[in-house]
Image: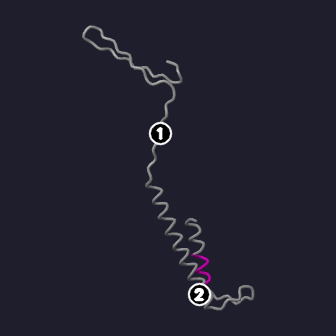
Amino acid sequence: MGIGLGIVLLVIGAIFYFTTVDSSVLNMSSGTGNTIGIILMVAGALAVILALVMNAQRARTQHTVVTERRGAPDVVERRVDGDEVVERRTERRDGTI
């Protein structure tokens, strides 16, 4: 159900409401056509409003990206050169350095 369905229902409801049909196929009097037209226009307006609300909610959602690392964890090598600490990070993925 979307905005298109609501517009179609509004148009069909307006056609039934504002025109008189005297064909043997539909066999509707003016009172029945008016009632069906009003019902279709209300349903179309509700469909349009519902579609707009759902689209607004969809636009406000947040997406989270999760990164999964497989294999051994990162390795940190530390060594002391005199007064200085030297650190080297090595990423290990899939068991390789």
Q: Dot 1: few (<14), some (14–19), or many (≥20) neighbours within 10 Å? A: few
In this picture, is 45 found above or below 76? below
Q: Quadrant of the N terminus?
A: bottom right
**Circle 1 — which element?**
loop
Q: Dot 2: few (<14), some (14–19), or many (≥20) neighbours within 10 Å? A: many
Tell me which amino acid carries mark 2. Asn
Question: Toward the viewer: 48 or 18?
Answer: 48
Asked if residue 13 is among those painted magenta in the image, a careful observer would answer yes
Q: Which residue is mark 2?
A: 34
Side (left or right) of 85 relative to 43: left
Q: Position of residue 62 (x, y in %)?
A: 44, 49
**Residue that appears at 75% across and 88% down:** 24
Location of residue 10 by image quarter = bottom right
**Residue that appears at 58% across and 78% down:** 40
Name the mark on residue 66: 1
Q: Which residues are magenta?
A: 10-16
Q: Find the residue positioned furthest to the front.
A: 72
Q: Main secondary structure of the magenta part?
A: helix
**Mark nearer the viewer, 1 or 2:** 1
